[in-house]
Amino acid sequence: MPRRKRNAGSSSDATGDSDDSGEHEKTDSSQSDGNTRANTRLTRASLRLSQSSQEAPPDIKHVVDRDESPPRTPTGNAQSSESDIDVSSPSASHDESQNKDPSQKDSDSDPSHRPKRRRFHESYNFNMKCPTPGCNSLGHLTGKHERHFSISGCPLYHNLSADECKVKAIDRDKQDDERSQNQTEESRHATRHQAATPRQVRYKEKVVEMRRKRDSPVSKEQKEKNMEHRQSHGTTREPLLENITSEYDLELFRKAQARASDDLAQEKLRLQGQITEGSNMIKTIVFGRYELDTWYHSPYPEEYARLGRLYVCEFCLKYMKSQTILRRHMAKCVWKHPPGDEVYRKGAISVFEVDGKKNKIYCQNLCLLAKLFLDHKTLYYDVEPFLFYVMTEADNTGCHLVGYFSKEKNSFLNYNVSCILTMPQYMRQGYGKMLIDFSYLLSKVEEKVGSPERPLSDLGLISYRSYWKEVLLRYMNNFQGKEISIKEISQETAVNPVDIVSTLQSLQMLKYWKGKHLVLKRQDLIDDWKSKETKRGSKTIDPSSLKWSPPKGT
């Protein structure tokens, strides 16, 4: 029996088998191709219309119910309402349903077996591939990444393999560690001295010897090899660089290439939004003769913060983008010490009082620099209500920044320090205690009791507790009376009584006995402190070298 196809507008019974149907098919076949397709297929809307106009037999109902869910395309998308559905005759559909496997019926009815809609990241092809011919995008010139997508990071373009790049990266890290270890072993004054150190002299001789060993004329075989490489690869590969210069200079060039490639990769990730705001921070700063690793994020302008490395003038604290700009700036910078009044000098140590209102730019740059090494600092630009006391160490090139602390001009809670910092290259040398001692010396001149503003950073808390312990033990060692009070200690040392009590409790020198608090004089702690003091010979502040009077209005 020929398969019968219903017209979209037909209301006749789908099970009717008459000669009219054959004549109707002949009439339909004589029409145009567009009308034939429209007459031989049913849309979902017309199918629902025919179903509502006349009750369909059970077989037809089964087909309609099974097709109620929108059919899926190969990509998982549902067809639009204008798409056509081919409906077979009821007898054929009945026969097919009988021949179907029961498991297949279950799979049709189970929605978990239906094609799922693909997610964007599964179906979208990013088409990221290295443009170098023959490269599989594996490895990176820096040896730190598993893949690359540009010529600058392609090992094949630079005539290297991925394994060779990793080996070179390990060697560079070892050399950097050795160089940093040698720099820490040398004295700070030796690095500032004009004459080269013995290690630098030996290194220079080694470089000169390596450059002498290079064969100045390029051999004929090497020329032929270079020409063959150029003809076979053209501009898709880097020219062969062996025997063009010494191994030392070639290695320097390779290091510069790897460093530039790493910077480009980081910049590309940042532009694509794959680097978060927390990681968009300055990693290192070049400050005078030192290259310092930063600890925290500082709100420098975006165009400077995204560079990763910042160049800062150690005298005026202006920040720049490159070594060339810094060198030009240093050639014309007239500053050799902080602005403001020098209120203390003893030997090479000086302290300058800088008013945040008079020298606003310098104080703002100082706060931005300090935020790189402080976690709790929140003051950056509103510097006018503060005074900054900057400690420096002088040599024949100028006064180099050691550290600083700031204090409010009018503090209602008698805070003598708002923010305090010792530069990383001067840490663990006694300068932090000198800054703290100087702040309490100013409080003594003002005839006030001072205390640092909370919260303190981790290193600041350690420094202050060590200073308070030293002050109390020195006072106990010099005290000759029988009765002592915390108020007397506070007036003598300008330390807040709360800080004195907390320090005495940590030293187990405060006891409660018979309704009274007693201060114990522990001779063992005093003897231990005296022995360490003689061995250490820590730096101290000389009150006679202070030339300062409290500002007016405080």
Image (cartoon, rainbow, N blue to C red):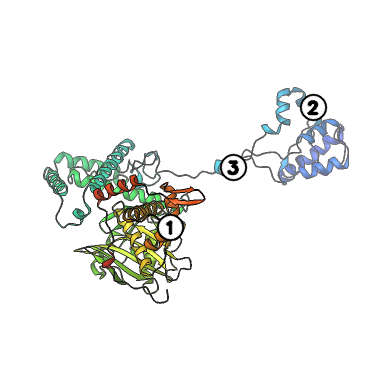
Going 46% across and 50% down the picture, which residue do you hit? 275
Residue 113 higher or lower than 40, as above or below:
above
Q: Where is residue 512? Give x, y as percent.
A: 48, 48
Residue count near mark 1 (Cα–Cα under 10 Å), binned few <14, some 14–19, many ≥20? some
Left of 549 or right of it: where is 214? left
Q: Considering the image in quadrants, where does the N terminus appear?
A: top right
Q: Residue flagged by tag 3: what amino acid is it?
A: Arg
Q: Considering the image in quadrants, where does the C terminus appear?
A: bottom left
Gap in Å between the C-alphas at discs 1 and 2?
Answer: 102 Å
Is residue 321 at least partly visible in the picture? no
Between residues 2 and 190, which one lies in front from this camera angle? Answer: 190
Q: Where is residue 71? Give x, y as percent.
A: 70, 38
Q: Where is residue 367? Give x, y as percent.
A: 39, 63
Going 39% across and 52% down the picture, which residue do you hit? 465
Q: Of circles 1 and 2, which is in front?
A: 1
Gap in Å between the C-alphas at discs 1 and 3?
Answer: 71 Å
Sequence-first disc among 1 and 2: 2
Q: Of circles 2 and 3, which is in front?
A: 3
Sequence-first disc among 2 and 3: 2
Which residue is identified by label 2? 94
Q: Residue flagged by tag 1: what amino acid is it?
A: Ile
Left of 345 or right of it: where is 50? right
Which residue is identified by label 1? 486
Tell me the SS state at disc 1.
helix
Between residues 415 and 315, which one lies in front from this camera angle? Answer: 415
Residue 40 higher or lower than 357, as above or below:
above
Which residue is identified by label 3? 119
Is residue 99 at least partly visible in the picture? yes
Tell me the SS state at disc 3.
loop
